[in-house]
Image (cartoon, grey):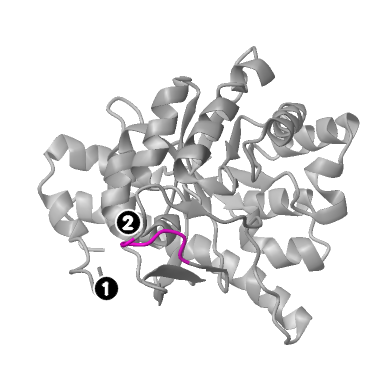
Amino acid sequence: MRWGHGSPPDWRARIAALSSEKRGALAARARAAPLFAHAYAFHLNMRFGGMAPLDLAEFASAQGLSGLKLHVDDGEGSSLGRMGDGALAVFADQVRARGLELHVETSTTEASGLSDAVRIALAAGATSLRCYPRYEGRVSQIIAWTIADLRRLAEFDPQGRLRYTLEQHEDLKSEELVRIIEAVDNPRLGLLFDFGNMINAYELPMPALALQAPHITEAHVKDCLVQPDRGGWAHLACLSNEGHLPLEAMFVELLLLGEDRPQVVSFGLEEEEGYFAPALRFPAEAADPFIPARSASFTDLGDGDLAARLWREAAVARQQVKTIRAMLEEIAAEAEGVKA
C-alpha cells in the first residue's frame, strides 16, 4: 500500500481481466450503486449545530440518494432514541414520502442496547440495523460474548423484519468477524465492510475485504491517512480520494459480489474528516490480546470557529457525493472500455 506496504492494487487491470459479461454487470452496478447519506458525515452538525434526523433525510433526497443511515443517538435531543413511538411513525412516513430507505445503527451488541435499537428501527420503518461490540476483554471473550448477543436477534425480531450487519469497528480482525457470523448462523445477519476500520486492527484493506467478502452486505465509504502508532496503525479520516485507501479497487470488488444480483445493498457515504482512531491490534501482540474499554466514535470539535467548522463539514459531505459518483462513473466507463 501507499503507506509503505507495496503498490496500490491495479483496479483497471482487474477490470480488464474480467469476462465481457462481468464487465457489463460491473458497469451497470457501478451506475446504479445504492448510495446512502450517513449521519456521521454530519457528526458535528448533529451534535452542535441543531441538525435533526429529518434534515439528513432532506439531504439524501436533495442529493438523489437511495436512503440514509442514522445512529439511534444522532441528533442529540431530536434523535431517534429520544422519540416516542408516535414520533418514530411520523418520521417513517416522512422518509417514505421522500422515496428513501432508512438504515439504523447502534454502537453495541449488548442485549439491552440491541433490543432497544431493534424496537426503534422497526418503529421508524427501517430495513436494516448495524451493530458492533464495544467490550473490554480478551479477544476470545469478546468473540464469545458477541456470538451470544447476536444469537438473540431472533428473539428481538421474531418475524425477521430487519436485516442486520456486524461492522468491523477497529478492534476485531476479519477472520474473527467471520467466525462470529458463521457461529451465529442467522441468514439475516451479514457484515458491514468499512473502507478504513481494518487499519486499526493491523489489516490491509484488500486482504480484509477478501476475507469478509462472502458475508458483506453493506459498506461505509470513507478515506483516511494511515499513521504509525506504537507499532501498529492509526487512521486519520480525510477527504475521499485524498488519503491512502484504494477506494476504486475496493468498490470494484464490492460491486462484483453477488451473481444474479448485487450482494452489497448499500454504500453509506461516511465522510469523517478529522476523525482519529488509534491502533488497537499490533503485529507482535499476544495470541489472545486484551482490548481496552473505549467510547463510541467521536470527532473532536477543535478550538476554532464553530460556525466555520460546521459549514465545512456540510460542504465536504456534499463534495463526497460528487467524488464518489465520479469514481463510480469512471469504473463503469473503464468496464465498458471507454476512458472516462
Determine which residue is flagged by label 2.
Answer: 205
Spatial separation of the CA atoms under disc 1 and disc 2: 12 Å
Give percent across and percent down for residue 38: 60, 52
Give percent across and percent down for residue 113: 72, 36
Q: Compared with residue 132, is residue 260 higher up or lower down, i.e. above or below?
A: above
Secondary-structure class at tag 1: loop
- Look at 44% across and 48% down and name the residue there: 172
- Look at 69% across and 30% down and name the residue there: 111
Q: Quadrant of residue 303?
A: bottom right
Question: Which amino acid type corresponds to the residue marked 1 in the rendered image?
Answer: Arg
Give percent across and percent down for residue 208: 32, 49
Question: Which corner quadrant holds the N terminus?
Answer: bottom left
Determine which residue is flagged by label 1.
Answer: 2
Q: Residue 1 versus residue 42: which sits nearer the camera? A: 1
| Relative to 142, 48 lies left or right | right
Q: Residue 334 versus residue 105: which sits nearer the camera? A: 105
Give percent across and percent down for residue 242: 40, 74
Q: Quadrant of residue 66?
A: top right
| Relative to 213, 119 lies left or right | right
Q: Residue 145 versus residue 11: which sits nearer the camera? A: 145
Q: Is residue 332 visible?
A: no
Pointer 1 or 2: first along the chain? 1
Residue 90 on the magenta span: no
Question: Which amino acid type corresponds to the residue marked 2 in the rendered image?
Answer: Pro
| Relative to 220, 242 lies left or right | left
- Look at 61% across and 34% down and name the residue there: 129
Range of magenta residues = 279-284
Q: Compared with residue 65, is residue 154 higher up or lower down, i.e. above or below?
A: above
Dominant secondary structure, magenta: loop
